[in-house]
Amino acid sequence: MEHKNSSGNTITFLGTAGARFVVTKQFLASGGLWLSLDGVEILVDPGPGCIVQSTKRKLRAEKLNAIILSHRHLDHAADTNIMVEAMTQGGFKPNGWLFAPSDALETEPVIFSYLRNFLNGIEVLQEGKSYQIGNISFTTPIKHIHPVETYGMIFTTSEHTFSYIADTRYFDDLCQNYKGELLIINVVFLEPRPTIDHLSLPDARHIITELKPKVAILTHFGMTMWRSKPWEIAQRLSEETGVRVLAARDGMKFDLSQLDNS
Ligand SMILES: [Zn+2]
């Protein structure tokens, strides 16, 4: 196997917990995703414990170029302030960008006002826009159906494209808007729960079948998913869909070069 880029392209799962009890009991960690892409470091959805999970894994916040929030819910944004503080070395070295939906920044903002000045800037996420962080670009193709303003993302590196479907209720446009070689998908429920705006396993199966990525990674597990052993679910989904489906584990590092031989 050839490694074209010495810095590598990896996604580290700083947590796989979704929904309240798995997060509040910390049955699973909830630190978000740490992306190392073509030398650019990006933190997505720093939930509770992100500072603990990232330092434990020797991921250096002062190297971060950006923090992106899919939405303002606690399990995605609780550690935003401390991670901004770490990214900017306590404010002594202004650094990095924060990307977030407008409702995360306006009334009851997720970031303290004194920390805003430590950033290079804040960008508001909007439907259908694209954004640049060094050599990496990402788009927020569509607004999700969730109680607060929420976006998923499609990231493009020099060699790969991958999508992240953050919290949402199922709607058909998800199946058109998140094409990529890799799909990371937040699957909270084992069975559909129509009154709650989260994806269930049957939703994920349908979305994966429609999008046909090379690899799909399930994460953000609620209690029903966790009790049913996500790795066994992933194995069954692989057989049913013909797509290689993995269940994320806390601390799992996925190297994008795995997509080259899929
Ligand atoms: Zn949410």
Image (cartoon, rainbow, N blue to C red):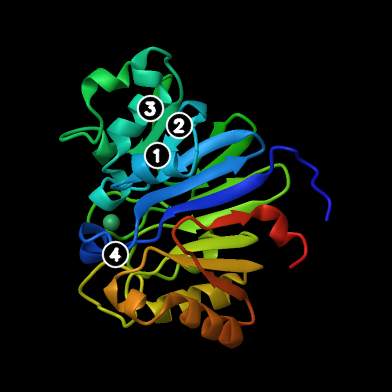
Residue 81 against residue 139 in the figure, above or below: above
In contact (CB < 8 Å): disc 2 and disc 3:
yes
Task: Tell me the amino acid under the disc marked 1.
Answer: Leu
Per the image, label 2 sits on a secondary structure element best described as helix
Q: Position of residue 181 (x, y in %)?
A: 65, 61
Per the image, label 3 sits on a secondary structure element best described as helix
Task: Tell me the amino acid under the disc marked 3.
Answer: Ala
Q: CA distance from mark 3 to mark 4?
A: 25 Å
Of the numbered discs 2 and 1, the one sitting upstream in the chain is 2
Of the numbered discs 2 and 4, the one sitting upstream in the chain is 4
Q: Name the one closer to the observer, 14 or 176.
A: 14
Q: Name the one closer to the observer, 220 or 198.
A: 220
Q: Residue at x 41, y 82 (%)?
A: 202
Residue under label 2, please give it: 61
Q: Which mark is residue 27?
A: 4
Of the numbered discs 2 and 3, the one sitting upstream in the chain is 2
Residue under label 3, please give it: 86
Q: Residues within 10 Å of mark 3 (few under 14, many from 20)?
A: some
